[in-house]
């Protein structure tokens, strides 16, 4: 995504918060739903699509794609960008008039699947084998592949090249290990800036957990209190306290991209949505994107994605499936990437995307080893509590924080 105003939604890896699971509100998610007649296998006069947009560029790109498909199919498509996607989606379901298709995040899928609100159409997609396996796993519940990943993002290390050179560093100094990261962060730290910045949240610090060989879930079981995770947070805590690492809020920024853009930080751990934010808000900042350094267990990063959810009660499922296949095709995903920044969710687009974005290849390379946040029902609340505790990591005991997260995760999988 390219708008810095959406960093919180993407930073949390969600467009849909846990409130979307409370399907109890009244009213419709759509202001003016298209006329939909016919049975559950198709036959309606039009499709309704609800998206959580990062801004005008994304909204217009989705509408243009829907219009192009409409011209080919003869089926009208109404696309609406939600003001509050969780609320409008839950209202639509509660009123019995949900959109045919909608953006859906991994953390929301389990709750909707349990409620019977989703159509599990993933295995019916002609291009199902083209999606990155880890993205398919994001949207698989109880062995059923529910919905097509629409795109994705990973985290990488973003470096201010001017400040890098000012510190006497070269490309040969790009850090590849935790030790090297700590060293260059210290070299880049001055009275006016910190070496490395990131948001005080699992959705950034989780990369260190992955690099240490940990993660919140391992083989479907809670593993938050592992020694690897403790080692990861101890590493971060050490360098928060020596002043070479900082949370974005500590340098007066709302997120890592802002701190990086205003040059209160020389490096940032962020996703590929930062590129658009820098272009829009800090066009004079020159930067390089490199893979995150490896930890004791090897490389690690996090990925974030959404899928095209389909309502189980949609009377237009056949047409909706055809539209999804169009929207997730190679050409269309590359067009979306050019328009508003995300990486295609299909492997067949990888070479073309890399050729078009050679300086950003580290983001796509991370797909090979990226972890994703838990997608069990209730995981949103667990991560929110984890993030609240991480804000005090500088003075807190990482083992105690992770013990609380472990207990909370165990409660979600009982």
Image: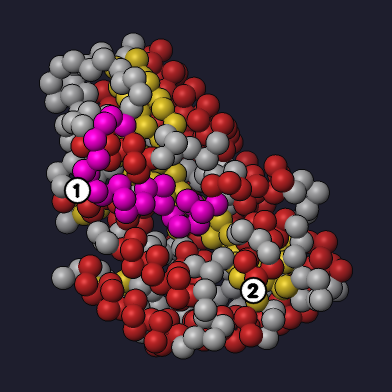
Q: Residue furthest front?
A: 26
Task: Estimate the spatial distance between the alpha carbons at disc 2 and disc 1, rounded to whole Å.
Answer: 39 Å
Residue that mark 1 sits on: 113
413 part of magenta stretch: no
Front residue of 58 and 299: 58
Q: Earlier in the sequence, mark 2 or mark 1?
A: 1
| Circle 1 crowding by C-alpha within 10 Å: few under 14, some 14–19, many from 20 | many
Residue that mark 2 sits on: 246
Q: Taken as a whole, is the magenta stretch helix, strand or loop?
A: loop
Give SS at disc 2: strand
Is residue 87 shown left or right of residue 179? left
- Quadrant where the image shows the C terminus: bottom left
Please state which of the two labelled residues, at mark 2 or mark 1, is closer to the viewer.
2
Tell me residue 400's x, y (percent).
39, 87
11 part of magenta stretch: yes
Q: Quadrant of residue 340?
A: top right
Q: Are marks 2 and 1 in contact (CB under 8 Å)?
A: no
Q: Which residues are magenta?
A: 7-29
* Residue located 41% across and 72% down the image: 386
Give SS at disc 1: helix
* Residue located 70% across and 42% down the image: 280
The colouring scheme, among rainbow, by chain, secondary structure or one colour, is secondary structure
* Above or below: residue 309 compared with residue 65: below
């Amino acid at each position: 995504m390219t708008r810095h105003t959406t960093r919180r939604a993407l930073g949390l890896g969600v467009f849909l918060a846990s409130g979307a699971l409370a399907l109890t509100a009244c009213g419709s998610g759509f202001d003016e739903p298209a006329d939909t007649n016919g049975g559950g296998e198709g036959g309606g006069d039009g499709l309704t699509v609800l998206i959580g947009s990062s801004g005008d560029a994304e909204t217009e790109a989705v509408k243009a794609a829907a219009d192009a498909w409409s011209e080919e199919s003869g089926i009208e498509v109404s696309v609406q960008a939600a003001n509050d996607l969780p609320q409008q989606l839950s209202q639509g379901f509660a009123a019995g008039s949900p959109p045919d298709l909608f953006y859906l995040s991994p953390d929301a899928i389990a709750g909707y699947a349990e409620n019977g609100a989703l159509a599990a159409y993933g295995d019916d997609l002609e291009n199902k084998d083209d999606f990155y396996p880890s993205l398919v796993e994001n949207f698989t519940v109880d062995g059923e592949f529910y919905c097509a990943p629409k795109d994705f993002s990973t985290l990488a290390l973003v470096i201010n090249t001017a400040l890098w050179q000012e510190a006497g560093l070269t490309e040969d100094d790009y850090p590849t290990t935790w030790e090297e990261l700590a060293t260059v962060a210290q070299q880049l730290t001055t009275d006016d800036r910190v070496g490395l910045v990131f948001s005080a949240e699992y959705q950034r610090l989780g990369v260190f957990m992955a690099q240490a060989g940990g993660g919140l879930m391992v083989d479907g079981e809670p593993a938050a209190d592992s020694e690897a995770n403790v080692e990861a947070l101890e590493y971060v805590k050490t360098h928060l306290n020596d002043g070479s690492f900082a949370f974005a809020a500590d340098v007066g920024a709302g997120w890592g991209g802002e701190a990086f853009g205003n040059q209160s930080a020389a490096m940032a751990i962020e996703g590929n949505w930062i590129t658009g934010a820098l272009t829009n808000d800090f066009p004079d900042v020159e930067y390089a994107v490199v893979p995150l350094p490896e930890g004791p267990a090897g490389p690690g990063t996090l990925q974030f994605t959404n899928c095209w959810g389909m309502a189980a009660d949609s009377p237009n499922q056949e047409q909706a499936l055809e539209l999804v296949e169009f929207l997730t095709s190679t050409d269309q995903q590359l067009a979306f990437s050019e328009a508003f920044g995300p990486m295609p969710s299909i492997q067949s687009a990888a070479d073309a995307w890399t050729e078009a974005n050679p300086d950003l290849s580290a983001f796509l390379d991370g797909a090979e080893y990226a972890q994703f946040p838990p997608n069990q029902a209730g995981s949103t609340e667990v991560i929110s509590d984890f993030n609240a505790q991480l804000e005090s990591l500088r003075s807190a005991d990482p083992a105690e924080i992770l013990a609380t997260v472990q207990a909370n995760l165990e409660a979600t999988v009982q």
